[in-house]
Amino acid sequence: MMESGFFEKPLETASQDELRSMQDARLRQVVRNVYTSNDLCRARFKERGVSPDDIRSAEDVAKLPLMDKDLFRLAYPLQLCCVPVRQIVEMHMSSGSTGTPVVMPYTDSDLHQWGQCMARCYCMAGAEKGDVVQITPSFGLFNGGFGMYHGAREAGLFVVPTGAGNTPRQIRLANDFGTRILTGVVSYGVRVMEVLQETGQKLDTVKIGIFGAETFSDSLKKKLSVELNAEIFDIYGMTETGGVGTLGMDCRAHDGTHVWEDHYLLEILEPGSEKAVADGQEGELVVTSLTRQALPVIRFRTGDLTRILSRKRCGCGRTHVRIAPITGRVDDMLIFKGVNFFPKQVEQALMLIPGVGSNYQILVDDTDGIREVTVNVEAEPQVTGYTVEKVLKEALGFSPKGDVFPIGKLPRQEGKAKRVFFKSKEAGK
Ligand code: DLL
């Protein structure tokens, strides 16, 4: 097993029993806080006929009402907040694919909690005090830039806060300042890779790549690792749980995402139901934050699909539960000719074709009630539509139409990439 550094070793390697009793006590406390300080939450508890006295251990979480993004929308801007507004020191916001604004306020203690979760991730990847970290997600309402910054401060790193964009300059800065850790959203990692290929530049000092915010297939991870010449980590988190890194990352064993269980309690439920699935079965991740003050989520339906991989101590020494990389979102699932599939499976298959680039689109055309699916992909001239169709047929069990475009020809977005386009509504955009 490769050496894996720790930020808070006693907590990261605490026994499962210790973690359970921490979760029991923290759940009791957070439920009481939410109930006494927030009218909306108290009303929802009452409607369900549950009070803080009913919560004794982590298992009792199932008695509590679930929350989802719609509740955040209804509660905009700060109705879910559990502290006086003057205690808020920062906020982040996501609008998501549906445009629903989700606001996350932070107290000073919340920023510290976030920084610590994120610092654990940096150290788990092998970061050491004084290392240079280049933070490429934007610094703004999106939580990516600031979260990586707060964590880097906790871990004692030298921050190069480039934010997004101007990739040739990013590469120059990385070489001039000796960046060892490059961070970003997955599609920005891809952008850096493309510019390295186009310009023949090299990253001289980068050893660690930390990417997330989007589904990330194994084949893309491998490709990025070769092209950036770095060990690649898949970092997870979301606005509602307090941002990037709060829900952990894979360690150097790359055998699942360690979720910080002293801070978060996980459930995996059948999508759309309250039924828990067994360990190993895929379902929707539901999260309760145990240590946040301003807006702790209680049983938040994340919409993300995953499964429990292991609750055993990992080779790296950590005891925190490991979940599989996110397959996709509950609402991302597409159905074609009776087969369910996720954009990530398309990506996984495409990246195995030699000469295929990393930018692709899935077009779904429902005109006249008949669904047609086309996959557009950038590739070198030797790759044909026929090859693309054949590979997709093997991977997915059906054959969408495959159209090949020269590298650089498909549109790109800033931030998270949009992969699926519904033609009836969005053609030509
Ligand atoms: O995307 C936080 C983040 C920033 C994570 C930078 C990693 C790097 P939101 O904008 O609120 O926050 O989006 C959260 O993005 O529910 C997932 O659907 C997706 N997501 C985040 N990380 C991953 C990942 C940030 N590693 C939503 N793999 C989540 C797959 C991810 N999906």
Image (cartoon, rainbow, N blue to C red):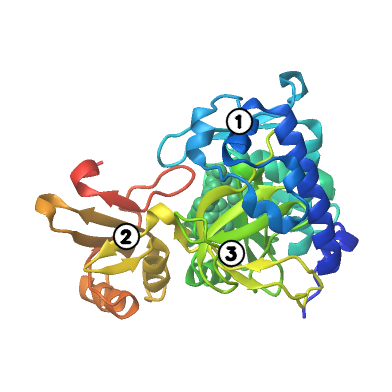
Query: Within 10 angstroms of label 1, few (less than 14), some, or many (20 or more) residues?
Result: few
Is 304 positioned to the left or the right of 19 in the image?
left
Residue 334's label in the rendered image is 2
Q: Is residue 287 above or below residue 356?
A: above
Residue linked to disc 1: 43
**Residue name at image x 69 percent, y 42 percent:** 147
In the displayed structure, does residue 149 sit left or right of residue 70?
Answer: right
Q: Quadrant of residue 252?
A: bottom right
The answer to whether residue 348 is left or right of residue 203 is left
Q: Earlier in the sequence, mark 1 or mark 3?
A: 1
Pointer 2 or 3: first along the chain: 3
Q: Is residue 230 visible?
A: no
Q: Amino acid at mark 1?
A: Ala
Looking at the rendered image, the quarter that the C terminus falls into is: top left
Dot 2 and dot 1 residues touching (CB under 8 Å): no
The residue at which mark 3 appears reads as 228
User: What amino acid type is highlighted by mark number 3?
Assistant: Leu
How dense is the environment of label 3, judged by Cα within 10 Å: few (below 14), some, or many (20 and up)? many
Q: Which quadrant would the N terminus be assigned to in this image?
A: bottom right
